[in-house]
Amino acid sequence: MKLRKLMGKQGFTLVEIMIVVAIIGLLAAVAIPNFMRARTQAQTNACIANLKQMDGAKTLWALDGGSGTPNWTDLVTAYLKAIPSCPANGTYTLNDADSDPTCDQSGHVLP
């Protein structure tokens, strides 16, 4: 009697498992590019926010009597907590007091 009950149980067929795997693959193919695009956009926005902070610090430095091109020690000691770093591993350049700071990553530009 017990043997008959065990033989009567059924599991998933190979076709059913393949359909589930195909659906999961399709969902992953749609979702992963969207996550990558969102990550890139978030890094760009964070970099632009850093550039705005550096620009504000340079403006305050110039108003306090600085002239020419500031260096990081001029800004970090009084206007910034630390030297900012680009989330996309870019490099910041301060430039002179009259121009905007820049990042070497494409798309990371002050509006």
Image (cartoon, grey):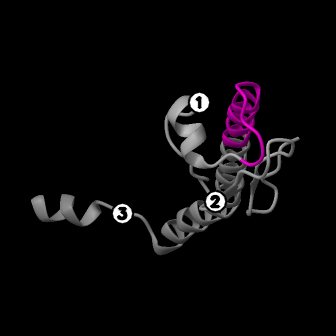
- Residue type at the position of mark 2: Ile
- Residue type at the position of mark 1: Tyr
- Residue type at the position of mark 3: Gly
In-front residue for pair 101/18: 101
Residue located 19% across and 62% down the image: 6
Q: Which label number is shown at residue 11?
A: 3
Q: How far apart are marks 2 and 3 (CA)?
A: 31 Å
The verdict on residue 66 being magenta is yes
Q: Mark 1 points at which residue?
A: 79
How many numbered circles are shown?
Answer: 3
Q: Position of residue 108 (x, y in %)?
A: 78, 53
Quadrant (top left/top right/bottom left/bottom right) for the N terminus: bottom left
In-front residue for pair 96/8: 96
Q: Which residues lie in the magenta part?
A: 49-69
Residue located 69% across and 49% down the image: 38
Label 1: few (<14), some (14–19) or many (≥20) C-alpha neighbours in 10 Å? some
The first of marks 2 and 3 along the sequence is 3
Q: Name the residue under label 2.
A: 32
The verdict on residue 50 being magenta is yes
Q: In front of the other: label 2 or label 1?
A: 1
In-front residue for pair 68/24: 68
Q: What element carries label 1?
A: loop
Prevalent SS, magenta region: helix
